[in-house]
């Protein structure tokens, strides 16, 4: 706002000159038309008496928002003369003046802490001393006590001695407090995080009385509820009274008040919030005041849900309030379409700048919607985009909650949201030391659900995550639920072939034991028993076992032995296995996928399909379900290796196994990696894994190596692949190139242990160096390369090198398909690999 017109100031000076200063100046100051007019009056007539200084601050405390913003500029320089005069007169201010000054300073938020505002710290310190004197003399009024506490909390001033003194005095005067004083005082102590249990007991005893609570404004009601929830102070009778009063007046609440009440009652886990919502609450229209005559008052949550359905109410919440309200309903276990639908619709257009949802609010909203099993792919997609845009500003808990929410809901697939998932791993890696056991196990589980592909987390990040899990478990111990998540994460590592980055054996075993223990505790449902009874009557079914724990720790609801289709895992999936619209949850998808990866044929009996069929039709439906497991036409058997028969192949593989009996490749790799990290070297894309010689023999059979061809292994490690190839086929030269010297040395030891007569290749070369600098494309008739841990740049280099391969050359890779137009896919199949299994792919250069 601009300065007062000159004529106005001139008139004020004339009035002052002709007025009795004892009453007239006070009247002019208190009725000044603007904050600038107050400062002009002070400048014209300083020095002012303490009572007039207090009046200046009283008028400034009533300044408009734009006036306050104007006064704050430049660290409050415009207020400097008044600040200086007040600081000199602090000892002469009475309790009313101290409280008035405190209130104004709280509104101005000039708190010190920077060079420009340092003088204000001196004023605050003097104010605290003056307030302590007033509290000791018991001269504060209830309003003065509440305003003084409020101002210090609002300004973020840490003044434990003052808060203790104010608490004692407020408790002494509690009977004289009105509803506003109670609410402001409780808010101040909760906001300052200053423990005052006796004061909160006194407020709870008096504020909950019907006469006082009836006088409460909606803001005082929400502030009281917020304060007791924030302080963690139990006051069930007070919250009962607030819930009854709030239910009757929800239409008067501001959007912020609705969000605050929702959060406070959810945080307090009060019965008015936890109770079941009557079906009528979702029908729209406002909640009716008064108690139901027979069933008692409906819970506050029901009334708030109905209030949010009133047109325009949900849309009036700002993004942060929307997220808080979603969180509150989900925390209460509230399921169903409302209020998530209306809150989600209001949230969707406000997820992005200029005034979009940010940081913790994004993760809270995603967590709430996933916890409620709410299905809205468009909303989840928008949340994923907002999370990707804000990911550098998210903390460890936010990242964990987001990953868990997207995984649990199964509405943010990796393929459709590369921007989020490509940044999740690096962002988590940067903050890995900030993750505790719960957030870390949630993240690990979410990654396992998201995708079996290494694209969602590269091997370097997987190794770091595994190490951090072991570290956290060693220091604080993970609980049973967290260990179960860790077990599924370990299965995921095996599923995608990251066995070199597996968890320590002790943690793996403890996680598996916890998983098995939980599986044995899981009760069977009535529906499961009915399905089992019907299945036993289906033709071809030899036996049906319930609750069968398989080797990997999973419980198969029903293990069906069928005469034609073999063993079948039948999952009886109740409502908790699905979202609100019937899509399988992330946990359900993960179990099915991991069981299938372990070789099981998995069939599902969803509760909705079972319930909608009459009993006579269920047996036929189950028969058709089992028939759907019938295998297709068998694939042709792979051609046997041309170079040797079965007997000689077995002999060659035994010789290779003997040569590696004393070579611990994983131990060598771990030591080498540890030495690298101790020296500050973190090489992305350099990780270790071992081929299984028998499985690799099968992969070689796919490409039918001819006598006299050359074989090249890019990244040969301890040499298992190159020596297996050399033992099985008559290559003119079998070459292995390995970058890490310790692994290269181990390969040489294995080569030395292999008898010359065991090798069919004319020459075996083991080289130490960068494989991609070797002329592999010019040499290779058959090339092998493990892609699991390669960077995108390395894979691009490999694809460029394929252009130089001669036509007819073959390439065997693992883990992922190559995008190269000059290659034709011959075969793909998952084969044993080290301690797990891995996808192998064979190509031909065309």
Image (tube, rainbow, N blue to C red):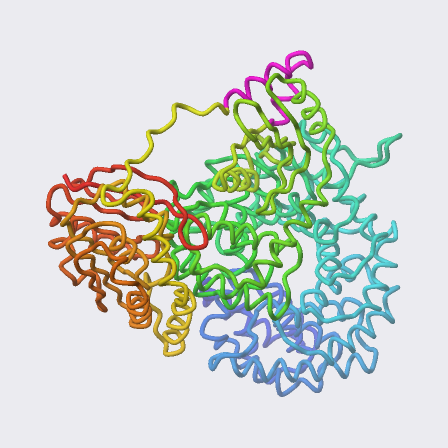
Frontmost residue, 674 versus 396? 674
Tell me: 417 left or right of 200: left
Identity of the residue drawn at 30% across and 71% down: 745
Along the line of sight, the residue nearer the viewer: 731 or 775: 731
Q: Is residue 226 above or below residue 348?
A: below
Chief secondary structure of the magenta portion: helix
Quarter occupied by the C terminus: top left
Extreme residue in the top direction: 616
Residue 203: x percent and y percent?
83, 62
**Measured from the top left, where is residue 98 in percent x and y?**
70, 77
Say which residue appears at 28% left-offset and 57% top-offset.
758
Residue 529 at x, y = what percent? 72, 28
Does residue 808 appear to the left or right of 647 in the view shown? Answer: left
**Residue 614 among magenta residues:** yes
* Residue 368 point in image, percent of width and height: 59, 45
- Location of residue 320 with respect to 87 vertically, above or below: above
Is residue 749 in the magenta section? Answer: no
Residue 28 visible here: no
In the image shown, does 136 or 807 lie closer to the viewer? 807
The quadrant holding residue 104 is bottom right
The front one of 158 and 704 is 704
Q: Is residue 518 left or right of residue 356?
A: right
The magenta span reads 605-628
Instruction: Please report the residue visible at 45 percent of the width from the left and 47 percent of the height from the top.
Output: 495
Number of marks drawn: 0
Can residue 644 be seen? yes
Q: Is residue 352 left or right of residue 481?
A: left
């Amino acid at each position: 706002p601009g300065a007062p017109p000159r004529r106005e100031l001139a008139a004020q000076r004339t009035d002052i000159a002709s007025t009795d200063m004892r009453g007239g100046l006070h009247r002019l100051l208190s009725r000044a038309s603007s904050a600038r007019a107050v400062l002009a009056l002070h400048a014209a007539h300083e020095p002012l008496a303490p009572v007039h200084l207090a009046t200046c601050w009283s008028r400034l405390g009533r300044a408009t928002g734009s006036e306050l913003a104007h006064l704050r500029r430049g660290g409050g320089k415009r207020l400097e003369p008044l600040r200086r005069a007040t600081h000199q007169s602090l000892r002469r201010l009475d309790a009313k003046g101290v409280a008035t000054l405190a209130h104004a300073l709280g509104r101005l938020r000039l708190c010190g802490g920077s060079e420009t505002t340092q003088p204000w710290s001196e004023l605050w310190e003097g104010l605290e001393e003056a307030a302590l004197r007033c509290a000791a003399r018991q001269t504060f009024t209830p309003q003065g006590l509440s305003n003084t506490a409020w101002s210090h909390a609002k300004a973020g001033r840490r003044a434990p001695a003052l808060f203790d003194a104010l608490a004692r005095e407020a408790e002494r005067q509690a009977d004289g407090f009105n509803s506003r004083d109670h609410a402001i005082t409780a808010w101040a102590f909760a906001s300052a995080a200053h423990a005052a249990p006796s004061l909160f007991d006194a407020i709870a005893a008096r504020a909950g009385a019907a006469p006082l609570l009836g006088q409460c404004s909606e803001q005082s009601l929400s502030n009281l509820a917020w304060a007791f929830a924030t302080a963690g102070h139990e006051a069930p009778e007070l919250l009962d009274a607030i819930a009854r009063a709030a239910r009757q007046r929800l239409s008067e609440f501001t959007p912020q008040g609705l969000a605050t009440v929702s959060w406070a009652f959810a945080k307090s886990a009060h019965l008015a919030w936890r109770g079941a919502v009557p079906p009528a609450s979702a029908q729209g229209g406002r909640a009716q005041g008064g108690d139901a005559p027979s069933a008692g008052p409906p819970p506050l949550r029901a009334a708030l849900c109905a209030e949010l359905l009133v047109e325009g109410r949900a849309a009036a919440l700002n993004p942060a309030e929307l997220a808080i309200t979603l969180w509150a309903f989900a925390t209460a276990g509230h399921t169903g379409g409302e209020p998530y639908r209306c809150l989600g619709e209001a949230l969707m257009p406000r997820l992005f700048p200029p005034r979009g949802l940010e940081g913790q609010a994004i993760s809270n909203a995603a967590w709430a919607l996933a916890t409620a099993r709410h299905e809205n792919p468009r909303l989840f997609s928008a949340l994923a985009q907002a999370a990707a845009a804000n990911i550098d500003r998210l903390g460890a808990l936010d990242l964990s909650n987001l990953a868990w929410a997207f995984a649990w809901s199964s509405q943010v697939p990796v393929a459709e949201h590369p921007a989020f998932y490509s940044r999740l791993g690096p962002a988590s890696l940067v903050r890995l030391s900030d993750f505790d056991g719960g957030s870390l196990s949630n993240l690990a589980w979410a990654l396992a659900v998201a995708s079996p592909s290494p694209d969602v987390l590269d091997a370097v990040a997987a190794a770091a995550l595994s190490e951090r899990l072991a570290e956290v478990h060693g220091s604080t111990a993970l609980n049973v639920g967290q260990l179960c998540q860790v077990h599924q994460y370990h299965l995921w590592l095996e599923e995608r072939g990251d066995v070199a980055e597996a968890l320590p054996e002790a943690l793996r075993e403890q996680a598996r034991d916890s998983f098995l223990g939980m599986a044995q505790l899981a009760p069977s449902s009535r529906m499961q028993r009915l399905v089992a009874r019907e299945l036993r009557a289906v033709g071809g079914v030899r036996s049906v076992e319930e609750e069968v724990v398989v080797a990997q720790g999973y419980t198969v609801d029903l293990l069906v032995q069928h005469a034609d289709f073999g063993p079948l895992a039948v999952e009886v999936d109740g409502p908790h296995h699905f979202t609100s619209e019937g899509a399988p949850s992330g946990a359900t998808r993960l179990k099915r996928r991991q069981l299938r990866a372990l070789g099981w044929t998995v069939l599902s009996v969803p509760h909705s399909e079972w319930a909608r069929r009459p009993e006579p039709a269920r047996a036929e439906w189950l028969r058709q379900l089992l028939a759907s497991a019938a295998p297709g036409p068998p694939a042709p058997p792979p051609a046997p290796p041309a170079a040797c028969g079965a007997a000689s192949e077995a002999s060659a593989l035994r010789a290779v196994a003997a040569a590696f009996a004393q070579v611990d490749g994983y131990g060598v790799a771990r030591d080498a990696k540890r030495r690298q990290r101790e020296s500050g070297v973190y090489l992305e894309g350099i990780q270790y894994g071992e081929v299984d010689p028998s499985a690799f023999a099968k992969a070689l059979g796919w490409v039918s190596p001819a006598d006299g061809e050359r074989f090249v292994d890019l990244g040969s490690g301890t040499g298992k692949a190159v020596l297996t190839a050399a033992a099985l086929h008559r290559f003119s030269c079998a070459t292995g190139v390995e970058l890490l010297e310790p692994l290269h040395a181990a390969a040489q030891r294995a080569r030395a242990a292999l008898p010359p007569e065991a090798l069919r290749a004319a020459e075996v070369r083991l080289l130490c160096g960068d494989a991609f600098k070797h002329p592999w494309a010019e040499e290779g008739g058959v090339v092998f390369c493990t892609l699991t841990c390669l960077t995108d740049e390395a894979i691009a280099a490999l694809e460029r090198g394929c252009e130089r391969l001669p036509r007819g050359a073959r390439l065997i890779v693992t883990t992922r398909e190559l995008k190269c137009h000059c290659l034709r896919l011959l075969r793909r199949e998952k084969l044993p690999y080290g301690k797990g299994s891995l996808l192998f792919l064979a190509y031909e250069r065309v």
